[in-house]
Image (cartoon, rainbow, N blue to C red):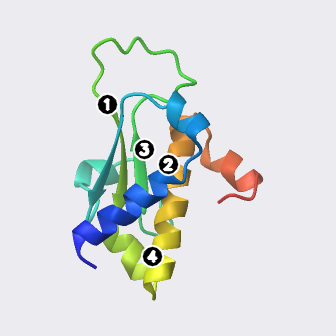
Amino acid sequence: MRTSDFEALVRDAVATIPDFFLDIMDNVDFHVRRKPLKRQLEGAILDPGEQMLGLYEGYPITEAFDGNMAPPDIITVFQDAIEEMCTTNEEVREQVRQTVIHEVAHYFGISDAELYDWGLY
């Protein structure tokens, strides 16, 4: 899939986030990369064969942080990993949506364990 088409899927996924949450989100950028950078993989806990689909980098709103001059938090969605696990464009679209929601949850301070307990992971 062309990167521009994948980026459109990410924009569509962000557009499905309820306005209530979008209104709270401040200083957050969404990025698309083909693969994670080496620094993005450092410290990641991945099972053998598991790939990183997305990554939230920043300070969750649940953590106190004086962000006067803070750079934006970044949510990155990794195109190659998602495309490798999906067989159809519709599966790619759904996985992008799930990945965006998952990473936005981290912005709100929700952990992987909580997402799992809630049946969302």
Residue drawn at the location 50% of the way across and 69% of the way down: 95
> What is the distance, in whole Å, between disc 1 and disc 2 at their CAs?
14 Å
Which dot marks residue 92?
4
**Amino acid type of the residue tagged 2 in the rendering:** Glu
Callout 2 secondary element: helix
Callout 4 secondary element: helix
How many numbered callouts? 4
Residue at the right extreme of this rendering: 118
Observer-nearest of 89 and 35: 89
> What is the distance, in whole Å, between disc 4 and disc 3 at their CAs?
19 Å
Q: Look at mark 1 in the image and give the residue it sits on.
A: 72
> What is the distance, in whole Å, between disc 3 and disc 2 at their CAs?
5 Å
Q: Residues within 10 Å of mark 4 (few under 14, many from 20)?
A: many
Look at the image and tell me in which quarter the C terminus lies: bottom right
Which dot marks residue 56?
3
Residue drawn at the location 27% of the way across and 26% of the way down: 71
Vertical position of residue 109 compared to residue 75: above or below:
above
